[in-house]
Amino acid sequence: MADKGLLIVVSGPSGVGKGTVLAEILKDENIFYSVSATTRNPREGEVDGVNYHFLTKEKFEELIADNGMLEYATYCDNYYGTPRKAVEDKLAEGKDVILEIEVQGAMNVKKSFPEAMMVFILPPSVSELRRRLNKRGTETEEVVNKRVAEAVGEIKKAENYDYVMINGDLDEAVETLKSIIIAEKQTIKRAGKIIGEVLENA
Ligand code: 5GP
């Protein structure tokens, strides 16, 4: 049986560019991206089943009741959650799985999967974050203000993560995240059995 894959939790405030960094990381076909469910409305260009599973509140609550969510949280008045089955299946197949989720949900994942690797992506500054959110142009000013306020609270919780990194320059951020994943896989707690394998025929 394949070794279990690595569960990688990536958080960072809305607008920090998590999606852009992860799009590069996901070119590795051994990494599976967990498509979340949400009750928020699709943004222009977002596709159901690709960016999110867009659900009604009733359907979402049904899934929670059936233990179908590995974690979930409310964020800016909407539910967001990770459907359990796909994640558990992929990990069992030995694939690494990325969850791109907010802080509250991430802390719940850490409780049920203490072996998960937790990464927080920071913006270079809060003013730069606001600039990026405005540039995206998908939200009203009121929503941008709400997301910036949420971001400040989230950044304060970054110290609960295993790794923090800044997304200033995209290429650099991608290299940093790739390096973190490689390094994490060589830690004694994950790779210790290699020593025994090397010594097998000694
Ligand atoms: P957005 O509306 O910008 O797509 O996402 C808002 C926030 O919800 C982001 O911080 C994003 O990482 C988070 N999020 C997306 N999917 C999930 C999920 O499945 N669970 C949790 N807890 N947060 C999620």
Image (cartoon, rainbow, N blue to C red):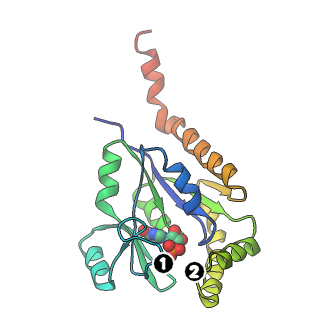
| Apparent side of residue 12 relative to residue 97 in the rendered image (left or right) | right
Kindly identify the residue that appears in the image at 44 percent across and 9 percent down: 202
Q: Residue furthest bottom?
A: 142
Q: Nearer the viewer, residue 202 or 169?
A: 169
Does the closest atom of ligand 1 sit within 8 Å of the Cβ of label 1? Answer: yes
| Residue 164 vertical placement versus 4 (above, below) | below
Instruction: Residue 181 in the image: state x and y as whole percent.
Output: 55, 44
Q: Nearer the viewer, residue 96 or 105?
A: 96
Q: Can residue 118 be seen from the camera position used here?
A: no
- Residue marked by disc 1: 43
Say which quarter of the image contains residue 86: bottom left
| Residue 105 vertical placement versus 33 (above, below) | below
| Apparent side of residue 76 relative to residue 59 in the rendered image (left or right) | right
Crowd tier of the residue under label 1, counting other residues whose Cα lies within 10 Å: few below 14, some 14–19, many 20 or above: few
Crowd tier of the residue under label 2, counting other residues whose Cα lies within 10 Å: few below 14, some 14–19, many 20 or above: few
Q: Can residue 51 be seen from the camera position used here?
A: yes
Q: Residue furthest top?
A: 202
Q: Nearer the viewer, residue 13 or 3?
A: 13
CA separation in Å, label 2 and label 1: 7 Å
Tell me the element at label 1. loop
Kindly identify the residue that appears in the image at 65 percent across and 82 percent down: 149
Kindly identify the residue that appears in the image at 23 percent across and 72 percent down: 66
**Quadrant where the image shows the N terminus:** top left
Q: Residue furthest front?
A: 45
- Residue marked by disc 2: 138
